[in-house]
Image: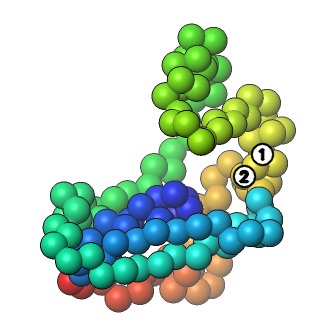
Amino acid sequence: MAHGALLETLRIAASSFGLSSEWTLRPGSPDNAPVYDVRLRPEPGLAPDPLLPFVEKRTVQRRPMRTTPLSEAQYRSLSSAVGSGFILQYFKRLCERLAIAGGQRPYPARLPRSVRGAPQHHRMGRPFQR
């Protein structure tokens, strides 16, 4: 799971327990292995997030995606959508994308299934319970 999706899912799930969450990137943690400090705090009156029913229904799209380059207008539109205090990075060249992906194979999902113990590797912990 992507880091942002994990942190957002944690926030959504915490709301069902009346908890708010906040996270910070640990100072000095490397870009290729970030460490997050997450704090959960009681938040009286906090309603469960409306996305809570969909947490367990999320899926991963593992099919190959098109590599059609974005137009300059699309880049400008994306760049203007980023809030203040954030930076949007583009990885236009294939070598840049492979480097940021950690040199993963194009279809990394296939590898664990071919390894003994793969079902345990992919099995999530206990089902989410409120």
- Residue 89 visible somewhere in the drawing: yes
Marks 1/2: CA–CA distance? 5 Å
- Report the residue marked by disc 1: 98
> What colouring method underlies this structural image?
rainbow
> Image point 64% across, 59% down: which residue?
108
Q: Quadrant of the C terminus?
A: bottom left
* Rendered image: mark on residue 61: none
Q: Quadrant of residue 110?
A: bottom right
Q: How many marks?
A: 2
Residue 23 lies, in percent from the top left, at 52, 68
- Residue 56 visible somewhere in the drawing: no
Using residue 33 as the reference point, say whether residue 64 is left or right of it: left
Q: Are marks 1 and 2 in contact (CB under 8 Å)?
A: yes
Query: Does 98 appear above or below 122?
Result: above
- Report the residue marked by disc 2: 101
Q: Quadrant of residue 30?
A: bottom right
> Image point 58% across, 76% down: which residue?
37
**Amino acid of disc 1:** Leu
Residue 97 lies, in percent from the top left, at 74, 41
Identify which residue, 11 or 20, lies in the foreground. 20
Residue 1 lies, in percent from the top left, at 52, 63
- Farthest front residue in view: 44
Q: Element type at marker 1?
A: helix
Query: Does 86 appear above or below 8?
Result: above
Residue 74 lies, in percent from the top left, at 55, 17
**Amino acid of disc 2:** Ala
